[in-house]
Image (tube, grey):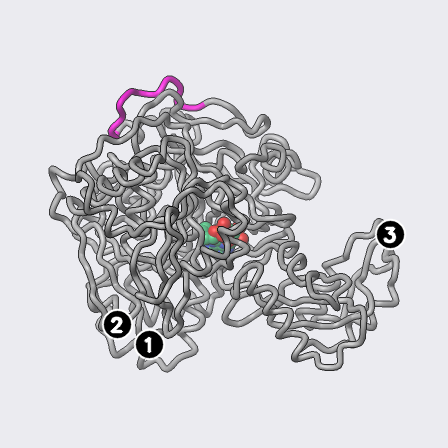
Amino acid sequence: MQEHTISSFEEYEKVYGQSIENPESFWADYAETFDWHKPWDNVHSGSFEEGNVKWFEGGKLNITENCLDRHLEERGDKTAFIFEPNQPDGLTRSISYKELHQQVCKFANVLESKGIEKGDRVAIYMAMTPELTIAALACARVGAVHSIVFAGFSAQSLADRIQDCDAKMLITNDGLRRGNKLVPLKEISDEALESCSTVESVIVCQHADNDIEWKEGRDEWWHLLIREVSREHEAVEMDAEDPLFILYTSGSTGKPKGQVHTCGGYMVYTSYTLRNVFQVDEDDIYWCTADAGWITGHSYIIYGPLLNGVSGIIFESTPMYPDAGRLWEVVEKYSVTHFYTAPTAIRALMKEDIDYVRRYDLSSLKVLGTVGEPINEEAWNWYNEEIGNEECPIVDTWWQTETGGIMISPIAGVTPTKPGFATLPLPGIKPALLDDDGNEVEGNDVQGNLVISYPWPGVTRGIWGNHERYMDTYFNKYPGYYLTGDGCRRDKDGYYRITGRVDDVLNVSGHRLGTAEIEDAIDDHPKVVESAVVGYPHDVKGEGVYAFTICEEEITDPEAFKTEINDLITKTISPIAKAGKVQVVSGLPKTRSGKIMRRILRKVAAGDTDDMGDISTLLNPEVVEEVKAGKAY
Ligand code: WT7
């Protein structure tokens, strides 16, 4: 992969300079390497101020032709995916580009036979199997907009997402096994669908062989449907700016937002970032351990690797099953060259006996990546020494669901790295730091709110059905910039270090959770009058959920109360949002305008109560002492 791949730091500096000087010709140059039915009219139009950014508009394409058809001649027999199932001794599968193409074409024909048309929304709630990828790509092939929902979300969360985008179809499994646990996906889907009137059909892909209920006329088996269809399918022509998918993500307020990514810009951006950041070569085996229910899976398991003709791994299990050696066992088993995971996994594994690592041959590894949260220096060093044998560059990749792909990151083997630093922006990306008044903080050795000053092809094009919220969240506060919600430091060498969210968003084990959403769930408890959720430092999860609750009556059994709260959170959101600590209080510190002063709660949650800062503007300063002295369970 030589072309359009940066191979030295001097080249990075040169290409970066050119890309910032003339972003349009930079991106057009790369976009030309894809198959288009018709070239675009405009490389780029619109602005952040107006919230109408477009790339390659008028260009006609289908992204799946670029993921699949384009490779058939040269790479038809090459492995597209290796599937590693939950059970270490389960059936592994290897799927070539030719087979994947056939499966996607078949399933595209199934979708059309069920009345799915361009622009329809299809929800996908599935296990991490090749079929999930086939389902997503088949949607893209017929022009339907996929909305993948992580298979750890509750019936309520699934229903919220289906309702928000009026999905016409749901594709799911009978169930999945994660470690020793069975997740009854069909049963959860049935419950969700009770409140989703737009879903006309459900396709069930057999996987866990658990017992399920069947709704005649609505439910159909995947394996029966694909028997009857052709393995050829003519891809539906899409405009570059037609939506490709919706992916929901939590923000500081309200329900999750449906981020909309479009066909052309997302394709160009994920492809470019994968090949450059990871420097993947033709014979490499690339493994991203994320779940396809998150953006990391969309961009760096499904689209990015396939666009580049790479061989990837689809991993169904977890780092701890059956023991803490599983990831390294898989690296050895398939001679993985590129390994991309989250800091939380690294922190959990470094606590285990080092023999779980040393028992496996990891010499195939060339590049290591991390994503999702800040990585602490200790974890970075362990990853470097124990996993990379100090020979593998580590790419600490900063980006977001909204950015479509990696934004600030080392280029493997090219950018000199520093533990804990995402280092430098990729070509085409222009970051800036703003003070709270919106002025750019110039120079080095400074910090501020991280914003991006110029549109790039992968940026979210909207929040499904809510343009106003899109403008308010990202563009209205500092006109002319895209607001990331992250705090960031630029050190003396101009290197970027992400310090974490500056809004009311938590990052628990790399999962993004809105405090408002969790509070809504807690407030459903009959005894709870009001609650406030903040994060607290957690040595494995990065951040844990700390809930302060005001209750109507005395809580005599706080442990039981905590369990009830967590059952509610599990039911309305997901077990990943469960509170690690619950503290009952008689009041919450509030400003005179009635806003909870979370700064104070964060300090209490962190156990850092020596200096509470200025509390004179509080309406009820007397609660501070009580909150400080209280006990959490
Ligand atoms: C938030 C985005 C990007 C895919 C996974 C998460 C945090 C992400 C890093 C990193 C420090 C990071 C930020 C960001 N984050 N990568 N390398 N270093 N923080 O996507 O769920 O949209 O969350 O994750 O706070 O805003 P997401």
Look at the image and give the residue range highlighted in magenta: 33-44
Q: Secondary structure at mark 1?
A: loop
Give the CA distance from mark 2 to mark 3: 58 Å
Residue located at (44% from left, 55% from top): 150
Q: Earlier in the sequence, mark 2 or mark 3?
A: 2
Q: Is residue 345 visible?
A: yes
Question: Which badge, 1 or 3, is on the more N-terminal residue?
Answer: 1
* Picture layout, residue 317 above or below residue 473: below
Quickly name the residue at label 3.
Answer: 592
- Tag 3: amino acid: Arg
Q: Secondary structure at mark 3?
A: loop
Is residue 236 found inside the magenta-colored segment of the image? no
Q: Is residue 339 above or below residue 437?
A: below
Mark closer to the chain start, 2 or 1: 2
Question: Are dots 2 and 1 in contact, CB under 8 Å?
Answer: yes
Q: Is residue 38 magenta?
A: yes
- Image position of 229 (left or right of 288): left
Which of labels 2 and 3 is toward the front?
A: 2
Element carrying mark 2: loop
Disc number placed over residue 322 in the picture, else none = 1
Image: 64 above or below 518? above
Question: Which amino acid, by three-letter code, is at mark 2?
Answer: Pro
Which corner quadrant holds the C terminus? bottom right
* Horizontal and vertical percent position of residue 303: 32, 44
* Tag of residue 447: none
Mark 2 sits on what residue? 88
